[in-house]
Image (cartoon, rainbow, N blue to C red):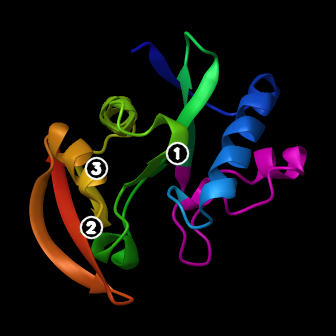
Amino acid sequence: MNIKLVKLSYEYKQQLFDMMDEWLAVEQNFSPYMIRRNDYHDFDYYLENLEIKEEKDGRVPDSTFFCLDLDRNIFVGAINIRHYLNDELLYTGGHIGDGIRPSERRKGYATAMIKLGLEECRKLGITKVLMTCDKDNIGSAKSIMNNGGVLENEVVEDGVIEQRYWITL
């Protein structure tokens, strides 16, 4: 698996469009939320507003990366890293939101992408990372545990059971 995390730029516009078109044809509410928050068709606005630079309206600063398969030159997923936790993120949401596009699931990309994301967390000085997933999302839970995630507990958010995992870096 030959992947790396990249920041979005004009160089990757087509890769973004291809991934988002596929994803949105299959599901509307996928993670990470930040990549579907704005309309990617207005690329300039999308690019400018992809990341939160300072805390505002309950949202903390974050960094968004896209997982580029270097052999095929496609985006296979995305990861959003919150630089610190507020009360809401501590309860549910955590430091990292991640997702793999539908056609690339069950191939090991999530585990590998999270590993690269944890390196970005280290660069930010985060030493203990919280990741959450819905209890019925077995693949996500496995990817988190494969990266050292230890289940702390389960909470109910909007009628859905969410598992909270901590990863010590």
Quadrant for the C terminus in the image:
top left
Determine whether, in the image, residue 15 is placed left or right of residue 95. Answer: right
| First of labels 3, 1 by sequence position | 1
- Residue assigned mark 3: 139
Prevailing SS of the magenta stretch: loop
Please, what is the three-letter code of the amino acid marked with disc 2? Asp
Please, what is the three-letter code of the amino acid marked with disc 1? Pro
Up/down of 74 relative to 53, above or below: above
Residue 126: image location, x then y, percent: 30, 45
Please, what is the three-letter code of the amino acid marked with disc 3? Gly
- Residue assigned mark 1: 102
Q: Secondary structure at mark 2?
A: loop
Up/down of 10 relative to 151, above or below: above
Residue 78: image location, x then y, percent: 53, 41
Residue 74: image location, x then y, percent: 63, 24
Q: Cα distance, mark 1 to mark 2?
A: 17 Å
Magenta part of the chain: 33-62
Label 2 crowd bin: few (<14), some (14–19), many (20+), radius 10 Å? few
Residue drawn at (66%, 39%), measured in percent from left and top? 19
Determine whether, in the image, residue 152 is placed left or right of residue 57. Answer: left
Q: Is residue 78 visible from the viewing direction of this image? A: no
Residue in front for this viewpoint, 77 or 96: 77
Label 3 crowd bin: few (<14), some (14–19), many (20+), radius 10 Å? some
Residue drawn at (39%, 31%), measured in percent from left and top? 109
Q: Cα distance, mark 3 to mark 2?
A: 9 Å
Determine whether, in the image, residue 126 is placed left or right of residue 17. Answer: left
**Residue 66 picture quarter:** top right
Q: Is residue 88 visible from the viewing direction of this image? A: yes
Indicate yes or no whether the magenta region holds residue 117: no
- Residue assigned mark 2: 136
